[in-house]
């Protein structure tokens, strides 16, 4: 994420960190990273921009949360952000100047960085 991207996210991140459970905070931060990444996300036969990917993943997260609250952020990544619920096909991420990777790998790396690892 660019410096400018982080500056744009700071007010939103500060507001989101108020009174949210840890999983919800981490998922919100991951979705913000997706939206600001400048990467493209592959799902169901097509490539989508970062904003569309973040919206799609947010919808899947909200659907899961309504059915049964997730206990870990890794559960969100595994159940909603790694593959299509319809086809079972793995999601992929391609960022400028980098190799295409599985969304699971990309998101777990971001999560580790958010946690300070």
Image (spheres, rainbow, N blue to C red):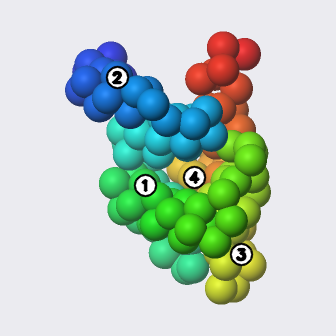
Query: Which numbered disc flags the more N-terminal residue, 2 or 1?
Result: 2
Q: Quadrant of the C terminus?
A: top right
Mark 1–mark 4 contact, CB under 8 Å?
Answer: no
> Does residue 27 sit above or below 5 in this rendering?
below
Q: CA distance from mark 3 to mark 1?
A: 18 Å
Q: Position of residue 53 (x, y in %)?
A: 44, 59
Q: Which residue is mark 4?
A: 93
- Foreground mark, 2 or 4, reads 2
Query: Which numbered disc flags the more N-terminal residue, 1 or 4?
Result: 1
Left or right: 101 in relation to 52: right
Q: Which residue is mark 2?
A: 14
Q: CA distance from mark 4 to mark 3?
A: 13 Å
Q: CA distance from mark 1 to mark 4?
A: 12 Å
> Does residue 22 sit above or below 49 in this rendering?
above
Q: Is residue 4 visible?
A: yes
* Classed neighbour count for the residue bearing mark 2: other residues with Cα under 10 Å, few (<14), some (14–19), many (≥20): few
- Taking the spot 70% from the left edge, 54% from the top edge, the residue there is 70
- Taking the spot 34% from the left edge, 54% from the top edge, the residue there is 51
- Taking the spot 66% from the left edge, 20% from the top edge, the residue there is 115
Query: Along the line of sight, which residue is nearer the eye, 43 or 99?
Result: 43
Query: Along the line of sight, which residue is nearer the eye, 86 or 61?
Result: 61
Label 4 SS: strand
Q: CA distance from mark 2 to mark 4?
A: 27 Å
Q: Quadrant of the N terminus?
A: top left
> Does residue 25 sit above or below 79 in this rendering?
above
Q: CA distance from mark 2 to mark 3?
A: 35 Å
Mark 3–mark 1 contact, CB under 8 Å?
Answer: no
Q: CA distance from mark 2 to mark 1?
A: 19 Å
As drawn, which residue projects farthest toward the bottom?
A: 86
Q: Which residue is mark 1?
A: 54
- Foreground mark, 1 or 4, reads 1
- Foreground mark, 2 or 1, reads 2
């Amino acid at each position: 994420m660019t410096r400018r991207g982080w500056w744009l996210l700071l007010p939103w991140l500060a507001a989101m960190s108020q009174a949210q459970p840890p999983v919800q905070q981490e998922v919100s931060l991951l979705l913000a990273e997706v939206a600001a990444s400048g990467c493209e996300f592959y799902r169901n036969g097509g490539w989508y921009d970062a904003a569309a990917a973040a919206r799609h993943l947010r919808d899947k997260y909200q659907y899961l949360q309504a059915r049964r609250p997730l206990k870990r952020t890794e559960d969100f990544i595994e159940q909603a952000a790694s593959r299509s619920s319809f086809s079972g096909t793995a999601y992929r991420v391609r960022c400028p100047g980098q190799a295409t990777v599985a969304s699971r790998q990309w998101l777990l790396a971001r999560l580790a960085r958010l946690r300070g690892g």
